[in-house]
Image (tube, rainbow, N blue to C red):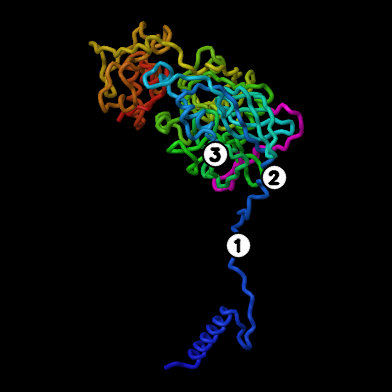
Amino acid sequence: MINDKTVRAGRIGVAAGLVAAVLAAGLAAPGVVAQVTKPLTIAAPAGAPLSFADLIERVSPAVVSVVVTTEIKVSQQERAFNPFRGLPGFDEYEDRFGKKGEGEGEGEEGGSPETDQEGRALGSGFFISQAGYIVTNNHVVENAREVTVTLKNGDELEAEIVGRDLQTDLAVLKVKKSGSYPYVEFATKAKPRVGDWVVAVGNPFGLGGTATAGIVSADGRELDGPYNDFIQVDAPINRGNSGGPTFNLNGQVIGVNTAIFSDSGGGSVGIGFAIEASAAKAVTDSLIKNGKIVRGWLGVEIQNLDPRFADAWGLKNVKGAVVSKVTKGGPAETSGIKREDIIIAVNGDKVENNRQLTQRVGGLIAGSRNSFKVIRKGKEETVWVVVRERGENIGALEPNANRDNFAAPKAATGDVKILGGTVRPLLATELSRYELTPGDSGLLVVTADRKGALEEAAIAAGDALLTANGKALKAVKDLEDVIAAAKADGKDDIVVLVGCGNRQACGDSTLLHPVKIK
């Protein structure tokens, strides 16, 4: 049974349909007043810009294209038959990635004579002062014979290199023409958060004034070099964006674009990396003031505090960098820092890993006195250290004929089986291999069984066990006593300081290893 309400609803629906049909035909139905409708719109989410145009218009005058003239060697055949020459950005690609490999020059089979050829590298940069100082990447201007920057208005100005820093891949230029230039500032008060909007402006493939937008997709990325933490962005950056700025929505520079990830060597796949603003500002300020970077030097080899180290040493909720070696005569030794100290703070700033310690020390002024908070044998202590200037060759492996010409030790009567291998005390004639001096001691690893505790800890025949849980190892019994004490305390591991016996296999001279005892 159909009730009156249902029928009325049906009739109203039909009438509405007729009105809609009449209106759709462009006619006015008798007695019906036409209503003006608006397109459907969706309100923008809070914080999302409707356009980046105002931001880009404001900051782009401070962004420049950098053209570097160099001399490169190219084969005559490449010069004659390259169909891509002259395309925007090709010279930069060729200069950096198109060089012939070693052994392919003149006189090699299949090669052709090489000639000196003027090359160009393209990059980006930005003014950081009214006086005309410009930040860019070191790799953009290294080996430069001439540097020219192009402003947004098309003016081309000669520039000189004020200073370069290979470690952070940063450089500072200064235009030779005096004037008052538009500039931008680094965002140093607060780091960007993952998800924040960012805008990159630069010179990709020679296309100056290009702007792209995206978000911060990650932070704290570790790439090459110990001094930089990189911000990862998905704003497309390509070859030629190197040295250019990435901005936040306030028009401040949050990072200097320096690298892209590409599985093909081509353009952007949405993963780019920028040097974080605070680090970039510190380096560029120093380059402007000194023309170079003067980094502090502590004189230690360090590694991260492995959780197994902390457990073996009975430490809880501790993070830091562990000293595996103290350089003889260096600032650390002079001040009293010891092997196996755990550095947890520098001048009150926490240190959570070895990279962070390297950055903290690198930021100290050479000759300054600084407090280092350490944990030594389970107790906190403060050591005051006067850091020195870090030289260019500090950290390089020094020649050691015994380690370079490695010969596996021979088994002999008296070797003791322990931890899935055999060991014996070091001989006086073997000390120099491990950079030890008369009076030092250790146990030589003669054999390391497959899948034994030593092998699983990456300890091989020819290495030397120098300490175990901080105790010097003069005899095999010393190691046995440490193992027995650790087992009595319910520990699964001991921490062994190992001297490398084969440079090609392990490189580092000394390194701490957690070794299973159960």
Residue that sits furthest to the left in the current view:
413
Distance in Å between CA atoms under marks 1 and 2: 26 Å
- Find numbered disc 1 in the image and state the secondary structure of the residue it sits on: loop
User: Label 2, on which residue?
Assistant: 58
> Quick check: 452 left or right of 187?
left
| Lower sequence index among marks 1 and 3 | 1
Looking at the image, which is closer to me, 179 or 379? Answer: 179
Q: Which residues are magenta?
A: 174-202
Q: Indicate the amino acid at tag 2.
A: Arg
Q: Residue at x 56, y 35 (%)?
A: 240
In the rendering, at what x and y percent does residue 18 appear?
Answer: 54, 85
Rendered image: mark on residue 473: none
- Quarter of image, res 277: top right
As drawn, 408 above or below 133? above
Q: Which residue is mark 3?
A: 231
Quadrant position of the N terminus in the picture: bottom left
Circle nearer the N terminus (1, 2): 1
Q: Is residue 195 magenta?
A: yes
Q: Position of residue 96 (x, y in %)?
A: 50, 29
> Which label was assigned to residue 43?
1
Work out whether residue 181 or residue 307 is closer to the camera in this orientation and state it.
181
